[in-house]
Amino acid sequence: MANKSKRSPRIIEGTGKFLVRVDGAGFYVGVHGDGRPRGTYYPSQAAHLTYEAADELCQRLQAMGYRDAVVTDLMGQSIDLFALDREREKREERSRRFWGE
């Protein structure tokens, strides 16, 4: 029996598609013992996050004074409103395909 209930696209969305770029420190990896962000210039070594987690991290970093912290895609391109719209469309399409709609 097929389940036709509506579910959030986040349930089937892959994770780890976004990075966080920190002021002058490259991409976010983690934190040093003193709480400062640790960065890398190699995207493959960076923390790979969902958009929601990356956005939340940017908000925390900006509150700590890292005013230029931004969410990027895996290629290091900043995520702007147009990129968010494209990602939302992709999620909705994957959700429709998953649920057979």
Image (tube, rainbow, N blue to C red):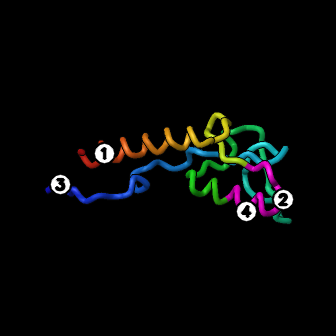
Between the C-alphas of marks 4 and 1, the distance is: 34 Å
Amino acid under disc 3: Ala
Residue 26 as seen in the image, left or right of residue 44: right
Foreground tag (1 vs 3):
1
* Amino acid of disc 2: Gly
From the viewer's perspective, is 37 left or right of 20?
right
Question: Which residue is label 2 attached to?
Answer: 65
Comes first in the chain, label 1 or label 3: 3
Q: CA distance from mark 3 to mark 2?
A: 50 Å
Circle 1 SS class: helix
Residue bearing mark 4? 60
Q: Could you tell me if the residues under marks 3 and 2 are in contact, i.e. CB atoms within 8 Å?
A: no
| Residue behind mark 1 | 96
19 up-or-down from 66: above or below: above
Query: In the rendered view, would you say 75 is above or below 50?
Result: above
Residue range (magenta): 57-69
Whole-Å distance between the Cαs marked 3 and 4? 42 Å
The percent position of residue 32, horizontal first and vertical second, equals: 82, 60
Marked residue nearer the N-terminal end (3 or 2):
3
Residue at 66 percent across and 47 percent down: it is: 71
The percent coordinates of residue 61 (x first, y second) are 76, 58
Please tell me which of labels 4 and 2 falls first in the chain: 4
The stretch drawn in magenta includes residue 100: no
Q: Secondary structure at mark 4?
A: helix
Q: Which residue is mark 3?
A: 2
**Residue 58 in magenta stretch:** yes
State the CA–CA distance, disc 1 to disc 3.
14 Å
Q: Is residue 73 or residue 46 the one in the foreground?
A: 73
Q: Are discs 2 and 1 less than 8 Å apart at CB?
A: no
Q: Earlier in the sequence, mark 3 or mark 4?
A: 3
